[in-house]
Image (spheres, rainbow, N blue to C red):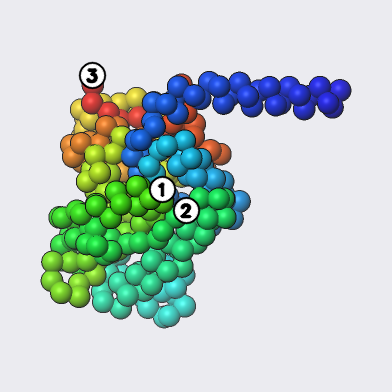
Amino acid sequence: MKSRDMNHDWIATARTLSEALPFMQRYAGAVVVVKFGGNAMGDEDAMAEFARDIVLMRQVGINPVVVHGGGPMINDMLTKLGIKSEFVRGKRVTDKATVEVVEMVLTGLVNKRIVQAIMDEGGRAVGLSGKDDDLMVCEADDPELGFVGRPVEMNPQVLRDLFKAGIIPVVAPVATGMQPNETFNVNGDTAAGAIAGALQADRLLLLTDVSGVKDASGNVMTAMTPEEVSAMIEDGTIAGGMIPKTETALKAIEEGVRAVVILDGRVPNACLLELFTEHGAGSLIRPKR
């Protein structure tokens, strides 16, 4: 009986791979930008699973770019160093001391941990930040917030060079400024959207800790147009932390990204479900055809 069950499992696995073939062909050569963050970053098993999915994407011919956050790790380090955080309208005021810690944590601890996870799963990855090769140049988003940046110039050639070499870029959302020796902290979703737009990506996947964009009744919207998203923001259906994510999605689509998906990163193999199955995962936002 046990042998029969195992045989059934292998048959199911083979069928799944066969059904995924058209989707693999569809995305061959495509650029997919993935914003990684949330609870998965603090869980070793979840990190390994995410890394395995990214390596598989690269293996079947997709060009993935991982853009990550690291808020909890930044908070921990600021606490250890005795640096107090001040917030304005829910956003952290980033002074010079704080931005130095942000750069240290994001480009060092967090970035290299993701790179190592991808390498452990058999992939090739290089960690970099928005500062490298002037990938992302920013100006201050709001003077009250200090060194919190808004991308104003993108130079993605370094990412294309890595694609040609079969290497997965892992990008920390730290950027250079218009003035010498300026460093800016950039919201991870904002950075991912800007990179996706600069690359004219086929997909931008924003991994979150919720199941997607919900309508007024609390049901997840599986497919939406930019016009519908704007209307839901206007009438208050989309609120709180979902507003910046959907605004990032709208801007990315305006800049040429084919579609954006807001999906639950806690779901096992969320990226693969979205790309390689008919059903997909989360909320797909794209222009009406």
The answer to which of 272 and 279 lies nearer the viewer is 272
Q: Are marks 2 and 1 in contact (CB under 8 Å)?
A: yes
Q: Which element is circle 1 on?
A: loop
Q: Quadrant of the C terminus?
A: top left
Q: Which element is circle 3 on?
A: loop
- Numbered mark located on residue 289 in the image: 3
The answer to which of 120 and 210 lies nearer the viewer is 120
> Image point 55% across, 22% down: which residue?
18
Q: Amino acid at mark 1?
A: Gly
> Image point 57% across, 50% down: which residue?
121
Vertical comparison of 130 with 51: above or below: below
Name the front one of labels 3 and 1.
Answer: 1
Vertical comparison of 76 with 29: above or below: below
Q: Quadrant of the N terminus?
A: top right
Q: Position of residue 191 (x, y in %)?
A: 28, 52
Spatial distance from mark 2 to mark 3, Cα to Cα?
37 Å
Task: Please give the residue where the numbered disc 2 appears in the rendered image.
Answer: 124
| Classed neighbour count for the residue bearing mark 1: other residues with Cα under 10 Å, few (<14), some (14–19), many (≥20) | some
Task: Please give the residue where the numbered disc 1 appears in the rendered image.
Answer: 166
The answer to which of 114 and 69 lies nearer the viewer is 114
Is 170 placed left or right of 196 in the picture?
A: right
Residue extending farthest right: 1
Q: Earlier in the sequence, mark 2 or mark 3?
A: 2
